[in-house]
């Protein structure tokens, strides 16, 4: 293998660090190969306008293979967001949004080290969250922020955007602080006086000049949107210009760059949060990138992390659509089945050609009427019974058969197609979500029993009203037990109890995001 082949394999196929090259080649004697690889990458290097904390300029390797991966990823993102944007059914779109946001929040909980269960995240997305847990506040505020940007046109990814996002995450309409004016610890000061020191964040004095150069990179249209998004995510995570919420802001800025580049606010659904998952290859690339200035590492790592997630989300979109179609189907009632069977029986069977060897004369003259109207010239002798021979010029309208056996029952004037097309009543949650919500209720509120959790999960549609009799019928319990249970659900804040004439009704109370 010549030097160009080495360079192509470990740049265009796998973009490896020197340490990873040692592992891939199973030898520590890789200096010569590494020089060839670096030379190939240098020939395809594009310098960038911003710098590392140690004042080394960032750059990208835009070789043929790397550019192909970037272009394929951008096409995939555009295709996926296009699928979401074409969904017309509000219920299907809402469920698709929940699938995307579930991935985003699950990954955000990992890097923010928020102790929140998957069931609680699902309840938060379904609007059925009913916990008073301060540990969940970071995820609740992050979800509010995502929904805020999904509800408005794409913002320009600049300092104003970061201020808007920072305020949304903190729950402050007007920020009283912006860039931090302190260091988190003494590690940045020590790294500044060491050759090749590893920075985990920038000294606060260097933040403003670093960020000023960085925004030149964000606005550089010579670099496509995927490298700008991935590079911006890394840079904010490296510099950490704010006192808190730096990783959340890094992810939001990456999404904003994609949203502006594609002109599609749905980019805030993309799970860029997964790139920052602790304990992955990103941890080693965090150090390698600031030493070399090569942003290609984190760009391709971002693509490698997101590609399988995007494939999975596209598959979920298809599953949700299929489930929606199936939910509109229901078994035929006995009356509808009778009508459908009669219609099927009334359809004439396939006419047999007179050229066949063994024609079977039909018993009923009505059934053969269409066949004898059409003149047919037989090519060989055919035995035809006299009673079915009809003179060619005499064409009579088909009369209703008279005899003990009618041809087919007459159909009532019923629009069968319209009846069958009526969908089942729309439920608040899908069957799977109901099961998960029952489990969530029992785990998050020990005051509820299984009957109460089951009834609530199946009767939680906003704007609907439920009665004690419904609980009694569903739970198969005494009226007093049903009344006590409904009052219990109202006392716990799940329902609002109202009096309507001479009876009480219970309507669901909007849950979630109220902490």
Image (cartoon, rainbow, N blue to C red):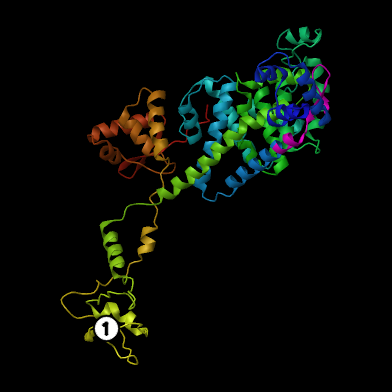
**Residue 163 vs residue 58, the one in the foreground:** 58
Residue at 69% across, 32% down = 254
Quadrant hosting residue 33: top right
Q: Is residue 51 magenta?
A: yes
Q: From what the image shows, is residue 152 above or below residue 108?
A: below
Q: List the single residue furthest toward the left.
A: 404
Report which residue position mark 1 lands on: 399
The quarter of the rendered structure image containing the N terminus is top right
- Inspect this view and state whether residue 173 appears: no
Residue at 39% across, 56% down = 422
- Inspect this view and state whether residue 157 appears: yes
Q: List the single residue furthest toward the bottom.
A: 393
**Residue 251 vs residue 309, the one in the foreground:** 309
Image x and y of residue 404, in percent: 15, 76
Image x and y of residue 456, in percent: 37, 35
Image x and y of residue 487, in percent: 33, 32
Q: From what the image shows, is residue 414 above or below residue 237?
A: below
Q: Is residue 273 magenta?
A: no
Image x and y of residue 426, in percent: 41, 47
Residue at 74% across, 17% down = 30
189 displayed left or right of 120: right
Q: Element at badge 1?
A: loop
Residue at 35% across, 92% down = 393
**Residue 457 vs residue 195, the one in the foreground:** 195
486 displayed left or right of 254: left
Quadrant hosting residue 297: top right
């Amino acid at each position: 293998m010549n030097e160009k082949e080495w360079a192509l394999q470990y740049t265009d196929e796998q973009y490896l660090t020197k340490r990873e090259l040692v592992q891939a080649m199973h030898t520590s004697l890789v200096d010569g190969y590494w020089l060839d690889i670096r030379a190939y990458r240098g020939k395809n290097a594009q310098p960038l306008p911003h710098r590392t904390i140690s004042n080394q300029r960032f750059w990208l390797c835009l070789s043929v293979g790397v550019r192909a991966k970037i272009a394929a990823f951008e096409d995939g993102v555009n295709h996926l967001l296009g699928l979401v944007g074409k969904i017309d059914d509000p219920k299907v779109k809402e469920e698709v949004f929940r699938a995307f946001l579930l991935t985003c929040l699950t990954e955000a909980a990992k890097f923010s080290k928020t102790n929140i269960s998957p069931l609680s995240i699902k309840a938060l997305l379904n609007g059925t969250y009913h916990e008073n847990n301060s540990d969940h506040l970071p995820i609740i505020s992050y979800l509010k922020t995502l929904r805020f940007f999904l509800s408005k046109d794409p913002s320009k990814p600049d300092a104003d955007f970061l201020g808007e996002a920072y305020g949304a995450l903190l729950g402050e309409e007007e920020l009283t602080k912006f860039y931090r004016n302190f260091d988190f610890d003494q590690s940045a000061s020590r790294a500044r006086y060491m050759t090749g020191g590893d920075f985990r964040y920038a000294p606060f004095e260097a933040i403003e000049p670093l960020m000023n150069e960085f925004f030149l990179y964000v606005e550089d249209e010579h670099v496509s949107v995927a490298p700008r998004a991935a590079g911006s995510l890394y840079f904010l995570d490296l510099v950490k210009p704010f006192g808190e919420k730096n990783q959340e802001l890094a992810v939001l800025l990456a999404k904003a760059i994609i949203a502006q580049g594609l002109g599609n606010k749905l980019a805030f659904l993309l799970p860029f949060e997964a790139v920052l998952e602790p304990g992955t290859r990103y941890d080693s690339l965090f150090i390698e990138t600031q030493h070399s200035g090569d942003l290609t590492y984190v760009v391709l790592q971002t693509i490698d992390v997101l590609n399988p997630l995007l494939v999975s989300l596209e598959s979920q979109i298809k599953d949700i659509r299929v489930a929606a179609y199936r939910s509109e189907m229901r078994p035929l009632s006995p009356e509808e089945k009778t009508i459908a069977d009669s219609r099927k029986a009334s359809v004439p069977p396939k006419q047999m050609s007179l050229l066949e060897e063994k024609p079977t004369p039909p018993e009923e003259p009505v059934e053969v009427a269409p066949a004898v109207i059409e003149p047919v010239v037989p090519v060989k002798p055919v035995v035809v019974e006299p009673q079915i021979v009809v003179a060619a010029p005499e064409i009579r309208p088909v009369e209703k058969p008279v005899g003990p056996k009618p041809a087919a029952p007459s159909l009532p004037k019923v629009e069968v197609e319209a009846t069958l097309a009526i969908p089942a009543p729309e439920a608040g949650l899908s069957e799977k979500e109901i099961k998960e919500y029952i489990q969530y209720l029992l785990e998050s509120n020990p005051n509820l029993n299984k009957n109460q959790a089951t009834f609530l999960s199946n009767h939680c549609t906003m704007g609907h009203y439920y009665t004690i009799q419904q609980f009694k019928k569903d739970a198969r319990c005494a009226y007093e037990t049903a009344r006590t249970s409904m009052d219990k659900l109202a006392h716990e804040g799940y329902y609002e109890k109202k009096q309507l004439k001479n009876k009480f009704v219970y309507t669901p109370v909007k849950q979630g995001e109220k902490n």
